Image: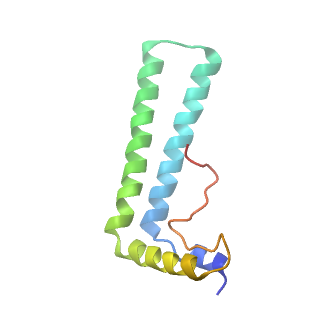
């Protein structure tokens, strides 16, 4: 089985759902933030909405980060990933969920 196939099959469905929710929350917050910056709109309602969306994004990311240590499947995948990473001559040969490359990266 190739490393790419591991990535496709070696991810917990719950982790994948949480990852998608986190990415979606981040994208929505970024869109609203960009709209406020472009319009130079500085009203209390816009600021409140950005804070609400930022908190939603932070909650989604926290839930995602807290899932893996509590999930037996994620722990199994992590241990396999560590084994493959340690024994592989390929620098990028890792198994998800801890090496998932997303379309948006967190900064």
Q: Quadrant of residue 7?
A: bottom right
Q: Quadrant location of the C terminus?
A: top right
Residue 58 locus on image (x, y percent): 41, 42
Using residue 63 as the reference point, say whether residue 28 is left or right of it.
Answer: right
Q: Is residue 93 above or below residue 48?
A: below
Numbered marks: total = 0
From the viewer's side, name the closer residue of 40 and 94: 94
State the residue at coordinates (48%, 51%).
21
- Image coordinates of residue 74 in percent, x first then y, are 42, 72
Q: Residue at x 51, y 76 (%)?
A: 81
Q: Give the image location of residue 9, x and y in percent.
A: 55, 77
Above or below, 38 against 60 in this view is above
Q: Residue at x 52, y 42 (%)?
A: 26
Which corner quadrant of the image does residue 76 belong to? Answer: bottom left
Vertical relation: 60 (above or below) 70: above
Left or right of 76? Residue 36 is right
What is the residue that sits farthest to the bottom in this orientation? Answer: 1
Quadrant of the rendering where the N terminus is positioned: bottom right
**Whole-percent x and y of residue 77?**
46, 76
């Amino acid at each position: 089985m190739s490393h790419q196939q591991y990535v496709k099959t070696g991810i917990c469905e719950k982790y994948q759902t949480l990852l998608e929710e986190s990415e979606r929350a981040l994208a929505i917050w970024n869109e609203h933030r960009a709209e406020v910056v472009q319009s130079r709109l500085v009203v209390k309602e816009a600021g409140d909405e950005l804070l609400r969306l930022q908190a939603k994004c932070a909650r989604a990311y926290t839930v995602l980060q807290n899932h893996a240590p509590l999930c037996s499947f994620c722990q199994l995948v992590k241990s396999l990933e560590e084994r493959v990473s340690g024994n592989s001559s390929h620098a990028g040969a890792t198994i998800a969920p801890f090496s998932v490359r997303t379309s948006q990266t967190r900064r």
